Image (cartoon, rainbow, N blue to C red):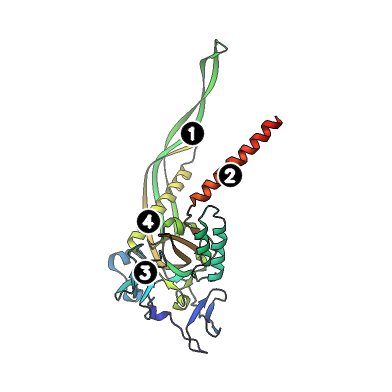
């Protein structure tokens, strides 16, 4: 993913071609000429996790990328060779080019951008229009500010074949009738009431599940709540990685290492397995005592997913908006204008007072 690989000269005028989400091809911003991307055929390659963790990867599976780390948000931003200073796309903090390089695992695949910057901005503007209590200045600045940045965000996917043995208890609800004394109109009466009970039975069993493409964010620069809000991703449409898709866009290097991503993936798998165990136990209640899981054939791949991103500084605070580059789903920080909120509360009180007055007059 070296930055030097991302430049493709136009065969007509020599200017740089960029990937065009509308056509799915390379397009010259100067003369409008297009060039088709030669898509690789076949399946995305899955790599063996145990081998990578124990022995490391073959040199052909990794590469050097030139990046600068943002000290404010931690983003690892990739630079082109001709860029010496830029701004962090994630928090709008100025960055100066770092002359060092990082060795990282190559991406196996990506989802190309399907939305243009214009379409992404329209989605963000529509979303902002529903923020009635946002400061007017921020809404105006966001709508008329600089162009959004197209960023390929790093993710890991993990596959695993799991078989689990469990011990627990199945609870069956039943009711018993008992007599109770209650006071009614000053007199004591005997009544019957139903009391819920649970009958427990020790159980054990096995469940099995194959996990396919457990998706884990490979970056710490965006809150997980943001990237979760952009789901679902159409991972069945992943393309085999080729640098042409990155032409005109930027890519973020991963900061969550492979092993750390797997730890998070296992937590997700364990939650799903626990649901499977409860379903297998059945009954009205389940008490899971012990689960032992055998995990085999763990594979992984590094992929890039497209996000349109805007970071705006407003009155000393950074506000971020992200748009799924495939579906147009939007997530952002919701600033509040206490002036608007106060006015709304006062108007609500006035309207309620007027309605109350007329009701009293006509009562």
At 49% from the left and 58% from the top, the residue drawn is 331
Numbered tag placed on residue 172 in the rendering: 1
Q: Are marks 2 and 4 in contact (CB under 8 Å)?
A: no
Q: In the rendered image, which residue does mark 4 sit on?
A: 264
Q: In the rendered image, which residue does mark 3 sit on?
A: 94
- Please identify the quarter of the rendering in which residue 204 is found: top left
Q: In the rendered image, which residue does mark 2 sit on?
A: 347
Say what secondary structure mark 4 lies in: helix
Q: Is residue 299 visible?
A: yes
Task: Give the vertical position of 185 relative to 240 (above or below).
Answer: above
How packed is label 3: few (under 14 Cα within 10 Å), some, or many (20 or more)?
few
Classify the position of the C terminus by image quarter: top right
How far across and down, in percent of the image, does residue 57 sit?
32, 71
Say what secondary structure mark 2 lies in: helix
How far across and down, in percent of the image, does residue 38 sit?
50, 80
Nearer the observer: mark 1 or 4; the answer is: 4
Q: Earlier in the sequence, mark 1 or mark 4?
A: 1
How far across and down, in percent of the image, does residue 8 sit?
46, 83
């Amino acid at each position: 993913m070296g930055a030097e690989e991302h430049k493709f000269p136009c065969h007509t005028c020599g200017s740089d071609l960029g990937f065009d989400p509308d056509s799915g091809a390379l397009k010259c911003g100067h003369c409008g000429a297009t060039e088709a991307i030669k898509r690789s055929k076949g399946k995305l390659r899955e790599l063996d996790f145990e081998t990578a963790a124990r022995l490391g990867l073959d040199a052909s599976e990794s590469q050097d990328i030139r990046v600068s780390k943002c000290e404010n948000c931690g983003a690892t931003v990739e630079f082109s060779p001709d860029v010496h200073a830029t701004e962090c796309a994630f928090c709008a903090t100025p960055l100066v080019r770092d002359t060092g390089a990082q060795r990282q695992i190559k991406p196996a695949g990506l989802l190309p951008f399907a939305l243009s910057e214009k379409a992404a901005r329209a989605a963000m503007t529509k979303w902002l229009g529903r923020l009635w209590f946002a400061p007017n200045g921020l809404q105006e600045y966001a709508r008329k500010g600089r162009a959004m940045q197209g960023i390929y965000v790093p993710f890991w996917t993990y596959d695993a074949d799991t078989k689990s043995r469990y011990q627990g208890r199945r609870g069956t609800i039943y009711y018993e009738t008992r007599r109770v004394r209650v006071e009614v109109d000053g007199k004591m009466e005997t009544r019957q009431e139903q009391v819920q009970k649970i009958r427990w039975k020790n159980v054990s069993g096995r469940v099995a599940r194959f996990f396919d493409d457990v998706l884990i964010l490979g970056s710490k620069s965006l809150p997980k709540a943001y990237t979760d809000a952009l789901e679902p991703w159409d991972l069945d449409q992943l393309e085999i990685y080729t640098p042409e898709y990155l032409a005109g866009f930027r890519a973020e290097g991963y900061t969550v290492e492979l092993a750390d991503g797997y730890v998070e993936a296992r937590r997700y798998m364990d939650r799903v397995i626990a649901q499977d165990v409860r379903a297998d136990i059945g009954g009205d209640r389940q008490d899971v005592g012990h689960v032992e899981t055998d995990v085999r054939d763990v594979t992984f791949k590094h992929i890039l997913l497209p996000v349109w991103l805007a970071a705006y500084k407003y009155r000393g605070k950074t506000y971020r908006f992200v748009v799924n580059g495939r579906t147009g789903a939007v997530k952002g920080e919701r600033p509040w204008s206490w002036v608007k909120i106060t006015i709304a509360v006062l108007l609500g009180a006035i309207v309620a007072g007027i309605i109350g007055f007329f009701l009293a007059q006509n009562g």
